Image (tube, grey):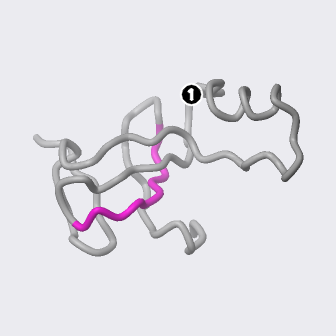
Amino acid sequence: MSFLLRCPHCGDRSVYEFRFGGEVKPRPAPGASEEEWVNYAYNRTNSAGVQTEWCYHRSGCRQWIKAVRNTRTNEVLETFYPEENAR
């Protein structure tokens, strides 16, 4: 059994076509402190359960997408373009 991600543009593809971009979290506001930017860039919650993550389709359409994935089971529940909202 292979691990597939559904690209909204290309359809089901092997996870090896994608680059993991980390969990989705809000960017610091303009004028944020250096500490806030360091926290944003380097710290992760690494929570067990469902989280939204960035994925880059490097071997396909070269688009960034978001994937809602259960980190306990590795099940991908949904994928969508960044400008769309999760259902």
Q: How many marks?
A: 1
**Quick one: quadrant of the N terminus?**
top left
Q: Quadrant of residue 78?
A: bottom left
Q: Does 31 lie within the magenta span?
A: no
Q: Main secondary structure of the magenta part?
A: strand
Could you tell me residue 34's position as x and y percent? Answer: 81, 29
Q: How far across and how far down the image is residue 63, in percent?
A: 35, 64
- Asked if residue 68 lies in the magenta stretch, the reply is yes
Q: Residue at x 16, y 49 (%)?
A: 14
Q: Is residue 37 above or below residue 61?
A: above
Q: Is residue 74 above or below residue 17?
A: above
> Going by the image, does 49 lie left or right of 76?
right
Q: Quick one: 57 or 30, which is closer to the camera?
A: 30
What's the magenta region? 61-70
Against 19, is 58 above or below? below
Q: Quadrant of the C terminus?
A: bottom right
The amino acid pointed to by label 1 is Ala
Tell me the residue at 56%/27% (across/down).
Answer: 48
Is 52 on the left or on the right of 26, as rendered? left
| Residue at x 19% of width, y 62% of height | 60
Tell me which residue sits at (56%, 74%) in the image: 84
Which percent across, then down, holds residue 81? Answer: 46, 69
Query: Who is closer to the viewer here, 30 or 52?
Result: 30
Choose between 42 and 4: the one closer to the eye.
42
Horizontal arrangement in the rendering, residue 38 relative to residue 33 (left or right)? left
Question: Which residue was labeled with disc 1?
Answer: 48
Dot 1 crowding, Cα within 10 Å, few <14, some 14–19, many 20+ = few
Q: Secondary structure at mark 1?
A: loop
